[in-house]
Every structure is written in C-alpha cells, then in structure tokens.
Image: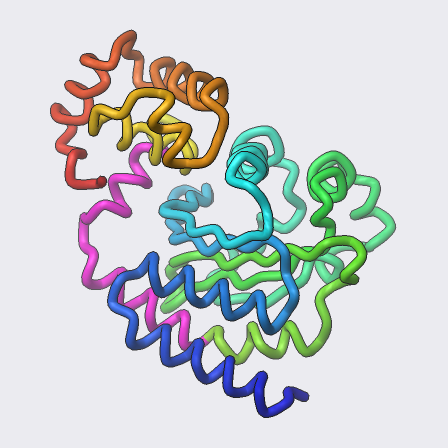
Amino acid sequence: MLEQKEYDILNGIIKTVYQTTNSQAMRRQVLMDLKKLTGCKFSVFSLGLLRNKIVYLTDSVIVSDFEKEFEDSFIYLSETKYEMSDYASWIFLIPESVVYKDSDLVNDQLRKKTPYYKDYLLASGLPHVAGISIVENGKFLGALTLYKAEKAGDFTEKDLFVLEFLRPHLETRLSTDDLRAGSNKNNISYLLKSNYFMTTREIEILGLVFKGKRNDEVADLLGIAENTVKKHVSHIYEKLEVSSRSQLVQFVLDHDMAHLW
C-alpha cells in the first residue's frame, strides 16, 4: 500500500515517538511527517483528559500551512462556538482508541448540512477530517486530528492505514508520559479548562502575561493581531474574575501555577 520512501517516513515517525523526550517536540515532528504522508494542511495533536463524560484537550501542538491568526481563530472556534456541535466528539468517549475519518462517522449528506460542517470546516477551507482518539487501558490520553483542503479530496484508505499503523505506538508513548506526569502541568491545564472554561490559547496567553509580556509583545510572539490579544486577555480576566494584571499574577501564584509555563 505504501511506497518504500513512505515506509521510511513512517518508520522515522515511530523512532520520533520513542526517542524524542520532549512531548511537544515529539508531537510537532509527528505532525510534520504526517503532513508529508497525507497532504493535510492543518493538524493538531493534543493531550487529553476525560472527566464526567466531558473531554478536555490540553497542551495542543499545531502544524499548518496557515498564519498564526488563522490557527488561533480555527482552534478558538472549535473550543467555543462549535464544541457542542462537533458530530465526531462522541469518538472521544469510547474506551478504546479509534482511527476515523469524519465522512465515515455519519451519513455524508446529513453531515454536509450541519452548521459544524458548513459554517466551520467548509468555511475555513478544511472540510475533510481524520484522526485518532488515543486511549490506553480505558483512559483517554489525547487526540491527533488532521484536516485537508476541499480540492485535496477526502482522506484515503492509505491515510487511515498510516494512522492505524501509528496508533499503538502513540498509545504506548502517551501512556508512559501520563504515568510519569502525575499531577504535573497537564493536570493544571485541565483544571484551568474544566474549572474556568479557558481555551488552550487563553492558557498560553495567561502564561505570557504572567511573565510580564505586554499585549504587543504577546501579539508578536504568537503572530496574531494585538486586538486579538486584547480580546483574549479580556476573556481571561472575566473567567478568572480579576480586573488587572497584578491580580492575574497573584491568581497564578495563589494557585501554584507558575511552573505551568
């Protein structure tokens, strides 16, 4: 099914999974290599937690062909406006790993009539979706999601073969990391999401503000507009019930969150 050069890339991914110590670096390289194999234009690899049948995705790594501004908007909409209308979200509740593509999950005609497809995926130019819900011993550990442009066509059987080939290796790696992590920063991210309903981007910006970065500096670092940063900071203030940067810093210190960043 794969050519030799594609198997070489796939074997390289497996090597990355086991030999790259830093989790974010590992996940980023996996996405970069999957882009070569599948032709996806946008990809996300998040760590995950499942509590009371609610899925929390944290510490997301993104690889895409787009500007940071688009990445920020795409993920923000996914985590807020369209979180409850994602017809694939039930996948994460299954107590075992699943390799899937969206067009196999529901009737395609019905799928294409949903706001999630029309107003989010298609409107963003990324209507084709495939991925892996990563579970080990019944515990949800993470999600890898790939998106293709409309002109590229849907994900193929070859693409799904690649994901299925990687699945057990990703299960092992994320399970090993989870055992080592204990109550580390990923659980802090979970608490910020579950208790304060913060998005991944808001957690990232919270860290930069805590470190003393001005709005314009945050914008430069993340490659997004300063007005976008201001909106995020405003949302952070509301969610944490603070009204100033000094109160925000005190909140982080009081909740022993400084090590998250």
What's the residue at 48%, 57% (across, down)? Answer: 143
Q: Residue at x 64, y 89 (%)?
A: 3
Is residue 85 visible in the rendered image? The answer is yes
Q: Quadrant of residue 153?
A: bottom right
- Tell me, yes or no, whether the highlighted magenta stretch contains residue 170: yes
Residue 29 against residue 233 in the figure, above or below: below
In what quadrant of the picture does the N terminus appear? bottom right
54 or 191, nearer to the observer:
191
Q: Is residue 48 magenta?
A: no
- In this view, the residue farthest toward the bottom is 4
Of all residues, the one furthest to the right in this rendering is: 109
In the rendering, at what x and y percent does residue 134 appear? Answer: 45, 63
The quadrant of the picture occupied by the C terminus is top left
Magenta segment main secondary structure: helix
Colouring chosen for the image of the structure: rainbow
Q: 206 left or right of 252?
A: right
Front residue of 252/70: it is: 70
Q: Is residue 198 in view from this perspective?
A: no
Residue 138 place in picture, x, y as percent:
40, 64
Name the residue at 75% across, 55% down: 106
Residue at 58% of width from left, 83% of height from top?
6
Q: Quadrant of residue 102?
A: bottom right
Image location (x, y in percent) of residue 165 = 53, 80
User: Is residue 104 toward the left or the right of residue 234 in the image?
Assistant: right
Q: Which residues are magenta?
A: 168-194
On screen, residue 195 versus residue 199, left or right, reads: left
